[in-house]
Amino acid sequence: MSASHPLRLGVNIDHVATIRNARGGDHPEPVRAALVAAEAGADGITAHLREDRRHIRDDDLIRLMDKLTIPLNLEMAATDEMLAIALRHKPHAACIVPENRAERTTEGGLNAAGMFNKLADFVGQLKEANIRVSLFIEPDPRQIEAAIRLGAPVVEFHTGQYAEVSGAARETELRRIADAAALAAKNGIEPHAGHGLTFDNVIPIAAIPQLVELNIGHFLIGEAIFGGLGDSIRQMRGLMDDAR
Ligand code: PXP
């Protein structure tokens, strides 16, 4: 991704597709949202092609690959179907996430330690295709250790738990994420973070010095209803930059 910002912002456009799909037509168009996001200061676009295609669809991925001038980070489950799609389209990056059809969103991190053999094959094939692989994991030393052994160049820490709690529990979660980012960086892994980040909770996360990228979606798309997508992204960018 571009080095234009000290902390990169990946804008997740899945929920533009959620709104489009609610009526079955072609509006609002996720690729148009991606172009607006790029214009407003996003360093990359993130899209999750889920097995059930509930938001982003295969044709969106094709158009994103065609039209985007900033890097695309494809979130994908560790399935043979998704691996084949990633190898066919060769996005800049692929983030391997756990996926469960019954969940509303990605509810927890990948059990990289428990899926070692399967992930070793995935990470190897994606790396060989020059796709930057990231593992979406909990900020847990056991998972970082697995990522090191897997040779993953990037990990993304799930900030969902941090976003859900408050007070002392949030401080504890923040410390866990900061410690995990330091441990990953010390071992040569680029740490990213994302999930559930908003204007109200992003600053302490953005202030963690080792973090290189945040991926933010649902809040930005929701906030766009009130002030427009460009403004919601510019405001988030401003908070992230101020935290550094
Ligand atoms: N990062 C990953 C790996 C995700 O799966 C998601 C949600 O799709 C996000 C970041 C963005 O989370 P949110 O939509 O809550 O901002």
Image (tube, rainbow, N blue to C red):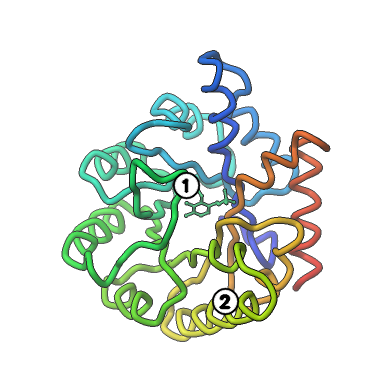
Instruction: Kindly identify the amino acid type of the residue bearing the numbered disc 2.
Output: Glu
* Separation of marks 1 and 2 at Cα, in angstroms: 20 Å
State yes or no: Cβ of the residue under disc 2 lies below 8 Å from any atom of ligand 1. Answer: no
State yes or no: Cβ of the residue under disc 1 lies below 8 Å from any atom of ligand 1. Answer: yes
Query: Could you tell me which residue is drawn at 67 percent across and 48 percent down?
Result: 42
Spot the residue most to the left. Answer: 117
Residue in the foreground of this view, choosing between 146 and 9: 146
Assign the N terminus to one quadrant of the image. Answer: bottom right
Query: Could you tell me which residue is drawn at 69 percent across and 59 percent down?
Result: 4
Q: Provide the residue designation for mark 1.
A: 105
Q: Secondary structure at mark 1?
A: loop
Instruction: Kindly identify the amino acid type of the residue bearing the numbered disc 1.
Output: Thr
Residue 44 position, x and y percent, is: 58, 49
Which image quarter: residue 147?
bottom left
Assign the C terminus to one quadrant of the image. Answer: bottom right
Query: Could you tell me which residue is drawn at 49 percent across and 64 percent down?
Result: 158
Mark with earlier residue (1, 2)? 1
Which image quarter: residue 54?
top left
Residue 188 position, x and y percent, is: 43, 79
Residue 89 position, x and y percent, is: 36, 37
Q: Which mark is residue 12?
A: none
Residue in the foreground of this view, choosing between 101 and 225: 101
Q: Provide the residue designation for mark 2.
A: 173
Query: Could you tell me which residue is drawn at 34 percent across and 41 percent down?
Result: 101
Spot the residue most to the top. Answer: 25
The crowd level at tag 2 (other Cα within 10 Å; few <14, some 14-19, many 20+) is: many
In the image, 237: left or right of 122? right
The crowd level at tag 1 (other Cα within 10 Å; few <14, some 14-19, many 20+) is: few
In the figure, 162 relative to 30: above or below? Answer: below
In the figure, 172 relative to 206: above or below? Answer: below
Tally the marks: 2
Q: Secondary structure at mark 2?
A: helix
